[in-house]
Structure formats: structure tokens, C-alpha cells
Image (cartoon, grey):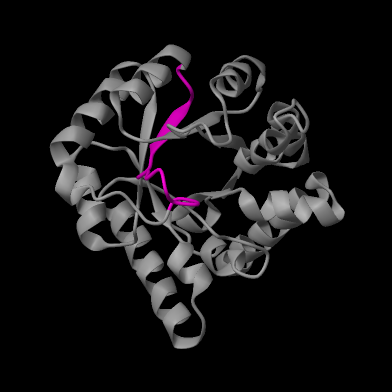
Amino acid sequence: MIKDRPLRLGVNIDHVATIRNARGATHPDPVRAAKMAAAAGADGITAHLREDRRHISDEDIARLSRELDVPLNLEMAATETMRAIALQHKPHAVCLVPERRQELTTEGGLDVVGARDRLGSFVTALARAGIRASLFIDPDESQVRAAREVGAPVVELHTGAYCEAAGTIRTRELERVRDAAGLAEELGLECHAGHGLGFETVGAIAAIPNIVELNIGHFLVGEAIFGGLDSAIRRMRALMDHARSEKSA
């Protein structure tokens, strides 16, 4: 039954690589961080290989593919170069995200409605290689339906607008996420969520029973500065589990 559905935690280790790259050296090692995250309770690891390689590198992806004992979710733009990399390493999953060189971080979801043909061929190529494709989209009905039309088995809902809002606007944004997650399940799509989630915002999203995975990175890496990565992940895991169990009770 839906109330018994577990909630997975994917930990994004991009910004461990950001810190490493600030000195152009080898420390801190994002692969080491990924293994620590798994030991602390992460169900999977997410890494975004950007076209400008500002944090995660090709060698990081190669090492993660070889050394991880938990699933690797490879975030990437829907380009021919990135598709070739995905087909080379064959991660458990690929999450397709929009990408612009000048942005600091991913600023919104994919426009699946406007790119059906291109994204459809990308999803098909990944599926033939045994890779699950996820589309990172805003919690919008038209985008959820378009994701289903292009054959994606998974959608990841962008929670940034919810996390950045306050008061009645936050309530409205939460409803958008809840409605989109419900629609995704109705259409037979697995639903994930992520972007901007922290200790104060994760509970309401974790309580949505149609969502089966949260992907969280920047906040956890930031909290690791103050109390360690292990502690940050364990606290996030506990908050997620509590919110899900409270909703199911």
C-alpha cells in the first residue's frame, strides 16, 4: 500500500568537488564523500557532470562507476556528448536537467513540452542500454504529462520554488508539488524530488506519499562544515523517515 512505501535518499556530492577544484588539487575527494554518504544512510549517489566541468570531472564519474556499492544517478544535459558518456559508463540512472553556462546552479526544470522529440530519442537510447531516465521538471501538469508522452519512467520535481518561498506562497508551492506527484503516480511514473531541500523544508516534501526519492546535496555539504557529513546525512535521513512515518500513521 502507498502508506508503506519507503522513501530513498540520494546524496549529491557535486560541491565536494567544487571545494576540491577551488585549489586545483585532489582534496577533498568526492568519491570518498560518496562512500561516506552511503555508510551514513544514503540509498544512492547523485553527481552532475556539467558541460563546463565546474565541479564533477570525467574521472570522478569513472571512479564512481567502478567503486560505488550503491546506485549512481548521473545528472546531465541532453546533449550528444553527454549521451555518449552515459552509454560508456552505464550508471543505474540518468537524470536529464537543463543547463546554461552562466547559471550558478540549475535554475528550473526541463521544458519537456517544447522538446518532446529530442528528449524522447534521448530517453529511448538510454532505455536500450538498460539505463533508467529521469526528467527534472517543474511541478507543472503539462510537464508531467509530457514526460509520460516521451517515455520517461521517472520524473524529479524541482522543489526550489517551495524551499525559497514563505507564508502563503510556500503553501501554494507545496500544493503544486503534491498535485504533480499525485499526477505522476496516476500516469505510472515514479516520482522523485529535489533542489534546495534542508532540515527545515524536507519534512513536508518527505510526507508526500507519492514521492519515493529525494536528492539532496548542497545543503548537506554545507552542514558538513559544521558537524560532519555523517552527522548531516543521518539527521536528514531521520527527518525524512519521521515525516513519512507520521504521514502514514
Q: Position of residue 177 (x, y in %)?
A: 39, 65
9 to 44, vertically: above or below: below
* Up-down relation of residue 204 to residue 41 (above or below): below
The quadrant of the picture occupied by the C terminus is: bottom right
Could you tell me residue 200's position as x and y percent? 65, 70
Residue 101 placement, left or right of 214: left
Res. 1 in view: no
Q: Residue furthest right?
A: 227
Q: Relative to 98, is 143 on the left or the right?
A: left
Give the magenta range: 90-106
Name the residue at 77% across, 34% down: 36
Left or right of 14 in this view: 141: left
| One can see residue 147 in this view | yes
Q: Is residue 204 magenta?
A: no
Q: Could you tell me which residue is drawn at 55 percent across and 60 percent down?
A: 196
Direction from residue 125 to residue 238 in the image, left or right: right
Residue shown at the point (16%, 48%) measured from the top left: 114
